Each structure stands twice: as structure tokens, then as C-alpha cells.
Image (cartoon, grey):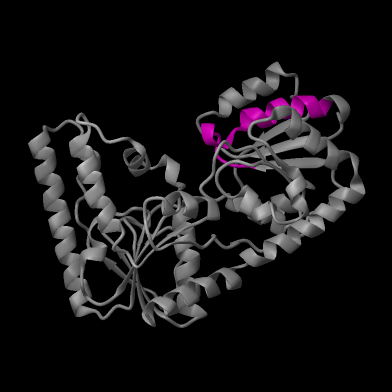
Amino acid sequence: MKIAYFFPNLKDSAGTERMLNVKANYLADVLHHEVTIITYSQFEDPIFFEFSEKIRFVHFNIPDPTSKLKGLGYWEKRKQYKEFMTTYRQKVEEYFYNNLTDIAISMYFGAEHKFLPLIKDGSKKIMEYHFHFDITPLSKKLKEKWSVKNLKMKIQTYLFQKTLNKYDKIIVLTEQDQEEWGRYFSNIINIPNPITINPIKANTELEKVLAVGRFTYQKGFNYLIDAWAIVNKDFPNWQLDIYGSGELEEELKLQVKELNLENSVNIFKPRKDINQVFSEHSIFALSSRFEGFPLVLIEALSCGLAPVAFECKNGPKQMMGDSQLNDFLVTPFDVDNFAESLKTLISNKELRLQMSEEAIKVSKKYELENIMSIWESTFLKLLNK
């Protein structure tokens, strides 16, 4: 198969870029497909991740005015953006008509997602979305009721909705998100992200709980620290280690100090060898307010950490709900029950070991080989239609 991925640029180390890197390399090196990655704003920036030598790169390098339009008037904004989109579409069409393509995938809501399914070159078009539906501006526009005041916006949204429905498939990460998208779009399926680390077995004897993530509102670490204040009263020897960075770091450190938890809560910078970090703990805590797809939870399960997680949107229920781990899904954002679930695992060494074994079992379906077989099967089904 000849597969083309579209992505704005590959200069960053974020999760979506990492997923593109892992999948593209597997498609090229293991499944032996012809993979091309097309960007429009790479310019002279180095590509962060290491891609297979078999992968071809096409960099259009078109100045994207999106981030520079704020101070301009309406007509100037419209003019510059239209010029960019016209140039970009012409280059994409030219590429397709000169390079036979079987599958074309728009990732990350790159600018091409607005016109890709309208290009009739014979390739199957896929939109791949890595964030949950509720946080997109599109979601708010679709859910807003029609009125005279918002008539123009609703008509524009309806026309855009028709364009997106022309994709052969829209692929999201979770069953819950598939349900949300499915209320407004056809041809929705979900394919989870694969595990990208080499798991190292956790030591369930260790008296250490782990949390990992950016220090942002989304991750809900304030809930976790409040829960730990309850846990610490009964289990003062246990430690909570939080690995991450972000704008709320000082706020979280102040919360730890105010709750007199300096001796049991440790905040660390992110580590690249996260699999080693997983192996040095026995319990994993996920206190997020929402997720697109909590890959860190699956990675923790693959290392055998017994999990406690809020049943937030999107992902924890899909990962834990059909197993014994379901008992450790906690109603969002019930701090008392979160603390009780942690204490249940802390107080019962045999249960921790049992949940560790269950976690590894649950994680198997998210192994790279299994997830990529779903992708290849999806591609083949589209081509055989």
C-alpha cells in the first residue's frame, strides 16, 4: 500500500507526533508499506523523532498565517488565510495527481482536513483525531441550538459537517469518543493508541504510589494530593511520587506544604526512561478531569502497576471496565473514594499482586502489533470496498 500522512510539522516531541512516529515506522519497516509524510510548516526545523529511512518526506514549507492574524482586520485576515489554503490545496492536489496514493490520512486537525476528502484522486481519505470531542470548538458549534443570532455560524458549521462526512473514515481513540462523534458524523470508528515503551515489571512490594502527567488543570493533581492527605494519616510510611512539569507546579507544591505532606509527596521532573520509573512503584494513580486517551495508564498497566483512576472522559473505563480492575474506577471527582481505593490496595499485599497480574493481562490488547493489525485491516477494508 502507498500511505500518505499529513501533519503540520514534526519539530515537537508531543504525544501525537510520537504516535505518528511509531505507526509510520511500523508500517514501513514491519509491514513493508510505502509511507510518505507530508508537512506544510517544517521549514528548517529538525525532525524531533527518529523515523525509518524507508519513509519519504515531502515538506511544502508554506507560511501559515493562522497565528499572525490576531491584530488584522476581518478582510485582511480572510485574504491571508484564503491565500494560504489555496496554495496548500494546490500543492496537495499536485502531489496526489503525480504520486499514486492508496490511503491519505489527515492528523491533528492539520489545515488539509478542510479539503482533503474533496480531492477526487482515488485515494481513500481518513481523518485521525487524538483529542476528545468535547474540547473542540466544533463540538460547541454543533451542540448550540439554531437561532437568528447564530444563523451564519450554524450554516457554516453544517457545511463543514458535510465536508467531514465525506471522509471514508473518521478515527478516534476511544469507544466513548466514538459515541460522541457518532451523533454528528458517519463512518466513525475507534482505534486506541499502542503501548510505545518496553515494559519493566513493577515491584508490588514497594510502598510507593506513582502519578505522571503535565501539571495542568486537566490532570487533576490537586484531587490526588487531597486524597493523599487522607491516605497519609493511616499509611505514613508510603510515598506518593508525581513526575511532570507545567504551569501549576508551584501551586501543587504549595498545596503539599499546606497539607504537611512534604515527607510523603515527592515532585520530580519528567524522565525519558519512564518504564524504569514505572518499575519502581507498585500502584498507579490517575486523577484526571478528562483525557483524550490516557496512554500513560496503559503503559503503567503494561508494567504491572495496580491502578486507581477516576472514571473520567475518555479512556479509563474502556481500559479497566471489563476486568477486575473495574473495582478501582472511582466516580469523578470523589476524593474520599479515591483515597479509600488507594488504601484498599496499600493495605492488601496479595490484592496488589493480583491486580498487578490483571493489569498486565489487560494491557496485552494495546501492544503495538495488535493495534497495527487493526490499522492494516481498516486500510484493506477501505481499499476492497
Report the residue at 49% width, 77% height from top: 377
Residue drawn at (22%, 51%), measured in percent from left and top? 159
| Residue 137 in sight here | yes
Total numbered circles: 0
Query: In the displayed structure, would residue 310 be above or below residue 99?
Result: above
Placement of the N terminus among the 4 image quadrants: bottom left
The spot of residue 67 in percent (x, y) is 25, 40
Most common secondary structure along the magenta stretch: helix
Residue 377 is one of the magenta-drawn residues:
no
Residue 223 lies within the magenta run: yes
Q: 69 above or below 48?
A: above
The residue most toward the top is 258
Tell me which residue sits at (90%, 43%) in the image. Answer: 348
**Residue 382 found in image quarter:** bottom left
Q: Is residue 65 left or right of residue 172?
A: left
- The x, y position of residue 232, in whole percent, is 82, 27
Question: Is residue 273 shown to the viewer in this render?
Answer: no
Indicate left or right for 74 with 277 as reference. left
Q: What quarter of the picture does the C terminus occupy?
A: bottom left
Relative image position of residue 166 (x, y in whole percent): 28, 63
Asked if residue 28 lies left or right of residue 353, the reply is left
Instruction: Describe residue 190's horizontal placement relative to residue 124 as left or right.
Output: right
Residue 370 quadrant = bottom right
The segment highlighted magenta reads 212-232
Q: Is residue 115 above or below residue 54?
A: above
x then y, percent, for residue 297: 64, 50
Give me the residue at 18% from left, 61% from top: 89
Q: Nearer the viewer, residue 270 or 32?
A: 32
Please determine whether, in this image, residue 302 is positioned above or below residue 75: below
